[in-house]
Each structure stands twice: as structure tokens, then as C-alpha cells.
Image (cartoon, rainbow, N blue to C red):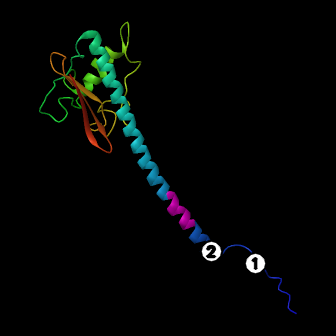
């Protein structure tokens, strides 16, 4: 009777490589789905921010019988004049940063504690990010303050504009 004392335990190199490649494939799929979830989360935040701004502007209108006047509202432009221009009182991003912030966050009864900003552009300016033409909150009104437009961009949905009057 032959005694086999040479029992080998463990995995072969081929088995280990197959398992490692399967784990690598599964982790790459998880990263792709995680990135998609991040995009959807940022878009949901943008929508919530703009809903908050619409409410704040309506509260401001009830108190002052006009919206904070700034920029050049343009009915024929895709963004209604709420451009991503940082130039004083011309562009929509300048109006959002300075005019709206002063109107909605200060005074004896501030409507907002702080201004919402795009999750990819915390300064809301073109100077600090590469996608600033795209990911920037902007605002414009007509000269009487009776019509406003707020423009923003979704990563999955493009340019969005909220108009109020």
C-alpha cells in the first residue's frame, strides 16, 4: 500500500488570476455606477437650490413689490440675459453673486442665511473653475424688476431657466 504524504493545499496561479480579474471587473463597474450617482446627486442639489431661490425671490417680491433689479433681461436669449459674465452689473453671475446676495441675505429680515452655489463651482465665478461657463448660477431682471430669470446647468439635462413675473 502506497502512502501519499505529498498532499498540496492552495490555489493554482491560474485560479488566482481568474479571481483577481473578476474582482477588478466588478470594482470598475462599481466605480462607473458611483460616478453616475454623483452626477445625479449634484443635479438634484442644483434643482433644490433653484427651488429655494424661487421661493426666496417670491418672498422678496411680496415685501418690495419688485424683484432685485440687475442685469439685462433678454426675451430672445436662451438664458434670458442671465449670462455667465462676471462684469459688474452686466452679467447674470455678477448679479447673482452681489445683487441677489445683498438683497436676500442682509437687512433687518434676511430671507436666506447664505446663497446657494453650484456644487462644482463654490465661488460661482468663471475665474476659479474650468467648467465655469457651464456650472454657474446666474440671474437677470428687466429694468422694472417685474420679470426675472435664473439660469443654471444640469450635468444630465443642459441649460435650465426659471422665469418669474
For the residues labelled 2 and 1, say whether their Cβ atoms are less than 8 Å apart. no
Is 52 situated above or below 64? below
Picture residue at 15% right of the left edge, 17% below the top: 143
Q: In this view, does 89 lie above or below 6?
A: above
How many marks on residues? 2
Q: Nearer the viewer, residue 56 or 21?
A: 56
Q: Does the magenta stretch include residue 136?
A: no
**Image quadrant where residue 69 sits:** top left
Element at label 2? helix
Question: Image quadrant of residue 116?
Answer: top left
Mark number displayed over residue 8: 1
The residue at 38%/12% (across/down) is 110
Q: In this view, does 61 lie above or below 22?
A: above
Q: How far apart are marks 2 and 1 (CA)?
A: 14 Å
Q: Is residue 95 left or right of residue 34?
A: left
Specify the label residue 159 is tagged with.
none
Name the spot of residue 92 as percent of width and height, x first. 23, 27
Q: Name the residue under label 2.
A: 13
Q: What element carries label 1?
A: loop
Res 91 → quadrant: top left
Q: Residues within 10 Å of mark 2 (few under 14, many from 20)?
A: few
Percent x, y of residue 107 = 35, 8
Toward the right, the furthest residue is 1
Report crowding for label 1: few under 14, some 14 to 19, many 20 or more residues within 10 A (C-alpha): few
Locate residue 128, reporting x and y percent.
34, 33
Nearer-N-terminus badge (2/1): 1
Write down the region rendered in magenta: 20-27
Image quadrant holding the N terminus, namely bottom right
Amino acid at each position: 500500500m502506497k502512502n501519499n504524504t505529498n498532499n498540496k493545499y492552495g490555489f493554482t496561479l491560474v485560479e488566482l488570476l481568474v479571481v483577481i480579474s473578476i474582482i477588478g471587473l466588478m470594482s470598475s463597474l462599481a466605480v462607473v455606477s458611483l460616478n453616475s450617482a454623483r452626477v445625479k446627486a449634484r443635479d438634484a442639489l442644483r434643482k433644490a437650490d433653484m427651488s429655494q431661490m424661487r421661493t426666496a425671490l417670491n418672498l422678496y417680491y411680496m415685501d418690495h413689490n419688485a424683484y432685485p433689479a440687475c442685469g439685462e433681461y433678454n426675451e430672445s436669449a436662451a438664458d434670458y440675459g442671465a449670462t455667465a459674465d462676471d462684469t459688474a452689473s452686466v452679467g447674470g453671475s455678477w448679479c447673482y453673486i452681489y445683487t441677489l446676495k445683498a438683497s436676500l441675505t442682509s437687512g433687518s429680515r434676511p430671507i436666506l442665511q447664505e446663497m446657494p452655489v453650484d456644487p462644482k463651482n463654490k465661488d460661482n465665478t468663471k475665474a476659479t473653475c474650468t467648467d465655469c461657463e457651464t456650472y454657474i448660477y446666474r440671474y437677470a431682471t428687466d429694468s422694472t424688476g417685474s420679470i426675472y430669470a435664473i439660469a443654471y446647468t444640469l450635468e444630465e439635462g443642459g441649460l435650465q431657466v426659471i422665469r418669474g413675473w
